Amino acid sequence: MSLKPKTSKRLLALGGIVLLLAAGAGGAVLYRNYRQKAQIDAFRTEGMAFVEQGEYFRGLGSLSKYLKRNETDLDALLAYAKARENIEEPDGAHIKQALDIYQKVQSLRPTPENAKHLLELYQVAGYLPEARDLAATMRPQDLAQCTDEHFDVLRAEANARMGIKPDDERISQLLDRMLALRPTDFPTQVVYVEHL
């Protein structure tokens, strides 16, 4: 069946119009996606700059908008955790929220710096079992192999163990090693005498 020439022209024009509308709609969607990505990237840049400058409240707002769409950006997560940690709340909720983020980052990208900071926050928040366990992973298993660089980790582990179970036999071993590393450390001497 053949179409009249006038009908063919109309169908061709209609097809062209539909094609132009589809291309226009596709272009609008691509442009909108590009603008959204640029805006979200601007939130990251702005938030990171605010945190770097110590303007934690402003950084927290920008980074939270960014992290809603990019929750696996570890550097942004670290900056957000730092900002969250530094905006104090009366009930200490800011420490617990920062801890959750630092734990997530440490599980995805373990570094000694993150582990040390996480250990400090565990102690501040009173998460003693977590502090004990993390400290034990941050030092050699054999206490005799611990060096002066492990001193703070040993102290954190000893403090956590004393808080959990004051008669833990491992506490004496930790304190002995600490005194072997720094015999003139007065706080360790005091704790050692009290522990006896």
Image (cartoon, grey):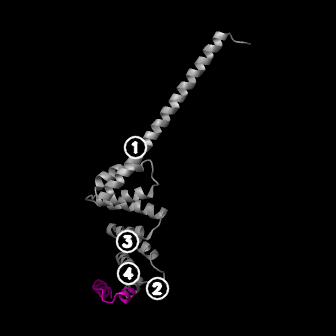
> CA gap, disc 4 to disc 3?
18 Å
In the picture shown, does residue 23 fall above or below 50?
A: above
Badge 4 or badge 2: first in the primary sequence: 2
Give the mark, 4 or 3, whose residue is nearer the N terminus: 3
Query: What whole-number distance in Å separates the C-alpha atoms at marks 1 and 3?
Result: 42 Å
The reply to whether the C-beta atoms of the residues labelled 4 and 3 are less than 8 Å apart is no
**Above/below status of 22 relative to 123:** above
Q: Which mark is residue 73?
A: none
What residue would you read off at disc 3?
128
Does residue 189 show up magenta in the picture? yes
Q: Residue at x 58, y 21 (%)?
A: 16
Q: Nearer the viewer, residue 180 or 63?
A: 63
| Image quadrant occupied by the C terminus | bottom left
Mark 4 vs mark 2, CA separation in Å: 12 Å
Q: Main secondary structure of the magenta part?
A: helix
Measured as percent of width and height from the top left, residue 140 is found at 47, 80
Q: Which residue is mark 2?
A: 145
Task: Give the foreground label among 1 and 4.
Answer: 1
Q: Position of residue 125 (x, y in %)?
A: 33, 66
Q: Which mark is residue 39?
A: 1
Labels 1 & 3 near each other (Cβ < 8 A): no
Q: Identify the mark nearer the N-term, 1 or 3.
A: 1
Give residue 151's mark: 4
Q: Crowding near pointer 2: few (<14 within 10 Å), some, many (20+)?
A: few
Tell me which segment is drawn in magenta: 177-196
Which SS class for mark 2? helix
Name the image quarter holding residue 7: top right
